[in-house]
Image: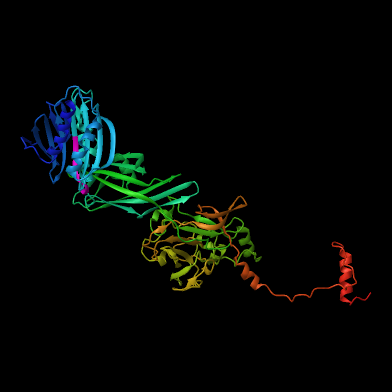
């Protein structure tokens, strides 16, 4: 009897969702967090009256508190409370199983998305989220001392996430009298359940670069990007709290919370306030891990005037699959002068240069002529390692000549087959300087000022390579030319924004050196030199400071092709012995030689 009664009350809940009972009272509350209390059924919860309109309905053996979203009447949360059933021993999961058929009929289907058993306010509970034809439903079934409580959230699929925090506030603050669970202090509530969800027009969030690619290296996966936060309002935005979650396989691996002082430390400008119509950059979201997370999720809680809002943003970390087989664009041993570690200048730019390399050519562990060789040159004893004498001038920047650097004039090779889409020449080679130009990179959009003389090659599949800082007058190709891997394209120089002669190389997803996005690149077939020992790397992403040498594999041809190219020699006639000569035994070299001599002389002795 008790089971039948409980089932009838549970099915009656569905009718209450659809407004089957006439409202018997309307409670008006102030524009703040309000507590709803039901003394008869011994329960309470908190809600936001500014966002939810409360109606209390009563039926035979049950009572319902229906919360309807003020700006979306099709969104509602319902607390259904049933009179106690003596000796009720059903599990909350069983009550849901009994209602499945009725719920599937009402909502036009029942596809379960999530289901679990938990404890809510010290009572046994079952939580399930399912979808019908048009709506998504989350239902909590709570059983305590013979009483059944149903806390249900119903919304169209497109609006489910937007109003979910308001329902989460009700769930987290739901309390049963006499259950031994302390009452809720509204001042201690998490902003996640209090703040109103806001769309992208309430706070602009942009990732730079976008998308974010993970670089996969041996034993390491790394990522780096910046966040730009924009305020579209006429009043300032105050950032109250930021939560950062590292997520893989829909599971949070780690969560970090930033309070206002921490926010001030990470934002440029040192303030947690964004001025009206202003923008602030949150730099250097970077990490190194054995395996990078699939995404990083942000929940930003901010105040605009008297409203507390929250905005969610997800950054997906993508693994790029390289299509082109790239080889090093030079011969000889070169050192990675600057790479793209997460705090290097290339990575900081977050543009086409995100995964760029700068290479310098070395001899004997040096990238330039040693002091003794320069002294010998100045004394009139030219060194074989010096191309020409440098101008005198002490230790100033002008004391170094371009030809003092071994990289200057070295041949630059095509890293893969492709078609030239840009070839720029004519920019002068600037004198070398002693300081890096990391902070002196031009901010304009003229690639000549950055790369000087440069070449862009289209390798197909949306992959383009750029070779920059080339020597003036050395570019040997023009736009539209087809090039082969290893073909000489130009010479290394010091044009553009360059402190000393070096070769700049990066791969991007378009031909524009400024607006394209940088792509991770792995080089194939090179020697990695460490402590005088070389190891062959079939495919790898070099690190700053490593010494590299391109491996030139011999051209392999078919066996038939090789045979056809061999020079033909006239065949010698078989040397026949006279009939009366005995054949010498095999292995008797002297006898064999004598027999051949007699055969050649016609058998005469």
- Estimate the x, y position of residue 456 in percent, counting from the top left: 44, 67
Q: Is residue 152 magenta?
A: yes
- Location of residue 515 (image quadrant): bottom left
Mostly what secondary structure, the magenta segment? strand
- The boundaries of the magenta stretch are 151-158
Considering depth in this image, is 151 or 594 the residue closer to the camera?
Answer: 594
Relative horizontal placement of residue 289, taking residue 123 as reference (left or right):
right
Considering depth in this image, is 210 or 258 the residue closer to the camera?
Answer: 210
As displayed, is residue 256 above or below residue 513? above
Residue reaching furthest to the front: 579
In this rendering, does residue 194 appear at all? no
As displayed, is residue 385 above or below residue 268? below
In this rendering, does residue 564 appear at all? yes
- Estimate the x, y position of residue 89 in percent, counting from the top left: 23, 25
Relative horizontal placement of residue 291, taking residue 64 as reference (left or right):
right
- Location of residue 131 (image quadrant): top left
Q: Is residue 16 magenta?
A: no
As displayed, is residue 4 above or below residue 429? above
- Quarter of the picture holding the N terminus: top left
Considering depth in this image, is 205 or 390 the residue closer to the camera?
Answer: 205
Considering depth in this image, is 292 or 425 the residue closer to the camera?
Answer: 292
Residue pictured at 56% horizontal, 57% vertical: 526
- Estimate the x, y position of residue 102 in percent, counting from the top left: 18, 39
Colour mapping used in the image: rainbow
- Estimate the x, y position of residue 274 in percent, counting from the top left: 25, 48
Please state the total of marks drawn on the protein image. Answer: 0
- Quarter of the picture holding the C terminus: bottom right
């Amino acid at each position: 009897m008790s089971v039948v009664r409980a089932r009838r009350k549970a099915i009656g809940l569905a009718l209450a969702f659809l407004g089957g009972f006439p409202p018997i009272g309307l409670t008006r509350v102030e524009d703040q967090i309000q507590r709803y209390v039901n003394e008869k059924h011994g329960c309470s919860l908190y809600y936001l009256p500014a966002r939810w309109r409360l109606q209390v309905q009563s039926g035979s053996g049950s009572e319902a508190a229906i919360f309807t979203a003020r700006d979306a009447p099709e969104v509602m949360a319902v607390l259904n409370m049933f009179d106690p059933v003596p000796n009720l021993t059903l599990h909350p999961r069983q009550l849901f199983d009994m209602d499945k058929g009725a719920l599937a009929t009402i909502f036009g289907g029942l596809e379960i998305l999530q289901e679990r058993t938990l404890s809510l306010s010290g009572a046994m509970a079952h939580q399930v989220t399912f979808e019908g034809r048009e709506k998504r439903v989350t239902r909590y079934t709570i059983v305590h001392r013979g009483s059944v409580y149903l806390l249900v959230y119903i919304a169209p699929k497109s609006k489910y996430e937007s109003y979910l925090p308001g329902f989460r506030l009700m769930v987290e603050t739901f309390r049963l009298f006499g259950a031994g669970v302390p009452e809720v202090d509204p001042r201690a509530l998490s902003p996640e359940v209090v703040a109103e969800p806001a769309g992208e027009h309430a706070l602009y969030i942009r990732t730079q670069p976008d998308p974010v690619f993970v670089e996969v290296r041996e034993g390491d996966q790394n990522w780096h990007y910046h966040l730009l936060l924009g305020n579209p309002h006429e009043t300032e935005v105050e950032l109250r709290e930021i939560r950062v979650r590292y997520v893989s396989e829909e599971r949070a691996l780690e969560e970090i919370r930033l309070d206002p002082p921490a926010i001030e430390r990470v934002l440029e400008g040192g303030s947690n306030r964004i001025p009206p119509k202003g923008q602030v950059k949150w730099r250097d979201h970077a990490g190194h891990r054995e395996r990078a997370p699939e995404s990083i999720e942000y929940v930003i809680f901010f105040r605009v005037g008297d409203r507390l809002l929250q905005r969610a943003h997800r950054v997906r970390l993508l693994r790029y699959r390289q299509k082109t087989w790239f080889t090093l664009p030079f011969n000889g041993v070169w050192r990675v002068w600057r790479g793209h570690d997460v705090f290097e200048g290339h990575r900081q730019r977050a543009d086409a240069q995100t995964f760029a390399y700068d290479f310098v050519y070395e001899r004997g562990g040096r990238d330039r002529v040693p002091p003794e060789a320069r002294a010998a040159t100045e004394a009139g004893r030219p060194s074989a390692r010096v191309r020409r004498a440098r101008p005198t001038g002490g230790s100033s920047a002008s004391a170094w000549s371009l030809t003092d650097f071994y990289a200057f004039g070295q041949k630059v090779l095509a890293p893969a087959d492709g078609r030239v889409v840009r070839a720029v020449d004519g920019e002068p080679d600037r004198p070398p300087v002693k300081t890096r130009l990391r902070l002196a990179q031009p901010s304009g959009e003229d690639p000549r000022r950055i790369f000087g003389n440069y070449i862009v090659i289209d390798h197909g599949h949306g992959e383009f390579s750029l070779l920059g800082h080339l020597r003036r007058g050395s570019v040997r190709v023009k736009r539209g030319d087809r090039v082969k891997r290893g073909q000489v394209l130009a010479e290394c120089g010091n044009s553009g924004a360059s402190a000393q002669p070096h070769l700049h190389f990066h791969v991007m997803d378009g031909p524009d050196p400024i607006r394209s996005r940088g792509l991770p690149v792995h080089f194939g077939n090179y020697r990695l030199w460490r402590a005088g020992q070389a190891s062959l790397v079939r495919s790898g992403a070099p690190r700053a400071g490593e010494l590299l040498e391109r491996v030139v594999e011999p051209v392999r041809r078919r066996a038939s092709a090789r045979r056809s190219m061999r020079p033909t020699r006239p065949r010698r006639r078989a040397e026949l012995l006279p009939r009366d000569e005995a054949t010498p035994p095999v292995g008797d070299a002297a006898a064999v030689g004598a027999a051949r001599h007699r055969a050649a002389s016609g058998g005469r002795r």
